[in-house]
Image (cartoon, rainbow, N blue to C red):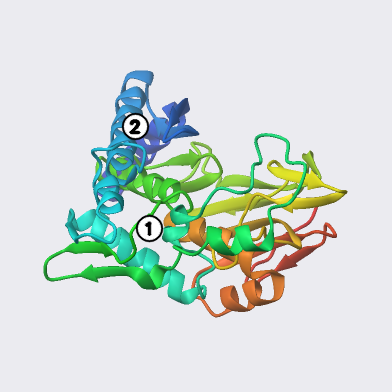
């Protein structure tokens, strides 16, 4: 009996080993939400992998239709078009996303604010700027920004923007949210391992077919071919925000594309921020927030949050870490 049992166990282990070895990594690159997405799954064959990747793409496209401010028929556009006029009833999913966004605004003292979409465009990072906007122009540009003027009615499930001309947008949280939702739908369909990479907003679960953890590189902002460190990512998310790809140079001074929604001025002193947390949505929002808050206040805030870690590379190219993260610099 004992020998039969051992044989049975051996056959099970042999089957599992064979199953794991037959799995491969499949990746598809696609433009969604105006950004480059890379969807990776671990599956037994191309047909299954392609089916599940398509599920993720459909989910991300659904999220885009919900939160897009470019689609005039989206609920987000309806909210913006009704600013200062009337509340708009929305789906629970969008209501909850806006509610969580306001909570993050409270946490970050307004450094993260979905009403930043109300800001007048004064800074251009896709073409040459020869002079700075005036202080009066900058002050005026943020006159309609303020998460405090987003009114939620939980009972009626409505959203109302108090000021006419006010807008909300999900550019600093939307890709992270979409990545989370794509991961969720794949896990619900028994995809045991994969990565959703939404232009640097990355969430991963499971492991490689080899049994190793997924690894993410932290690169030198001043030399993207040089890796500072590799971080293992298991059932968590990592988002890096950097100003080394989009900036302007006026009279020898560099200005970041990440604007403080409270002041209208570009953030200073940081080259890149990496946030590690369970959800890509939160990591996405916090990466922008830390940039705006600066190194000292940003790190202090992260150190008070549970299961959230941070790596900052400042303008002197030095690494500053939150308390609970360990990295081995290369």
**Of 99 and 208, the residue lying toward us:** 99
Q: From this viewpoint, which residue is outermost toward the right? A: 252
Q: Is residue 146 left or right of residue 319?
A: left
Relative height, residue 154 to residue 164 (above, below): below
Q: Looking at the rendering, which quadrant does residue 225 occupy? A: top right
In percent of width and height, residue 17 lies at 42, 36
In percent of width and height, residue 251 lies at 86, 48
Q: Which residue is mark 1?
A: 166
Residue sitting at x 35%, y 70%: 149
Observer-side mark, 1 or 2, equals: 1
Relative height, residue 6 to residue 105 (above, below): above
Q: From this viewpoint, which residue is outermost toward the top? A: 47
Residue sitting at x 49%, y 36%: 209
Relative height, residue 307 to residue 53 (above, below): below
Question: Element under label 2?
Answer: helix
Q: Which residue is mark 2?
A: 57
In percent of width and height, residue 169 lies at 40, 51
Q: Residues within 10 Å of mark 2 (few under 14, many from 20)?
A: many
Residue sitting at x 50%, y 55%: 119
Question: Element under label 1?
Answer: loop
Q: Earlier in the sequence, mark 1 or mark 2?
A: 2
Q: Is residue 297 left or right of residue 316?
A: left
Marks 1 and 2 in Cβ contact (< 8 Å): no
**Of 199 and 321, the residue lying toward us:** 199
| Residue 279 at least partly seen | no
Q: Is residue 223 left or right of residue 94?
A: right
Q: Is residue 100 left or right of residue 85?
A: right
């Amino acid at each position: 009996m004992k020998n039969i049992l051992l044989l049975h166990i051996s056959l099970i282990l042999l089957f599992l080993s064979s199953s794991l070895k037959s799995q491969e990594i499949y990746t598809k690159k696609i433009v969604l939400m105006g950004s480059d997405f890379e969807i990776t799954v671990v599956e037994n064959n191309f047909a299954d992998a392609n089916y599940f990747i398509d599920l993720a793409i459909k989910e991300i496209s659904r999220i885009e239709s919900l939160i897009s401010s470019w689609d005039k028929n989206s609920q987000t556009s309806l909210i913006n078009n009704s600013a200062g006029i009337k509340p708009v009833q929305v789906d629970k999913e969008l209501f909850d996303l806006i509610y969580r966004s306001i909570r993050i605004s409270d946490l970050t003292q307004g450094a993260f604010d979905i009403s930043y979409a109300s800001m007048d465009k004064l800074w251009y990072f896709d073409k040459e700027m020869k002079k700075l906007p005036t202080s009066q122009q900058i002050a005026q540009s943020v006159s309609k920004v303020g998460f405090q003027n987003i009114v939620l009615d939980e009972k009626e499930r409505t959203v109302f923007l108090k000021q006419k001309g006010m807008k909300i947008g999900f550019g600093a949280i939307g890709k992270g949210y979409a990545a989370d939702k794509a991961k969720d739908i794949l896990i619900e369909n028994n995809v045991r391992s994969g990565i959703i990479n939404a232009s640097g907003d990355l969430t991963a679960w499971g492991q490689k077919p080899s049994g190793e953890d997924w690894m993410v590189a932290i690169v030198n902002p001043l030399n993207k071919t040089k890796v500072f460190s590799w971080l293992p990512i298991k059932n968590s998310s990592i988002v890096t925000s950097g100003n080394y790809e989009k900036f302007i140079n006026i009279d020898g001074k560099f200005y970041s594309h990440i604007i403080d929604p409270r002041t209208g001025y570009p953030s200073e002193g940081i080259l890149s921020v990496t946030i590690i947390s369970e959800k890509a949505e939160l990591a996405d929002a916090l990466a922008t927030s830390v940039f705006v808050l600066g190194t000292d206040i940003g790190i202090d805030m992260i150190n008070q949050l549970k299961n959230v870690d941070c790596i900052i590379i400042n303008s002197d190219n030095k690494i500053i870490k939150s308390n609970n993260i360990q990295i081995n610099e290369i």
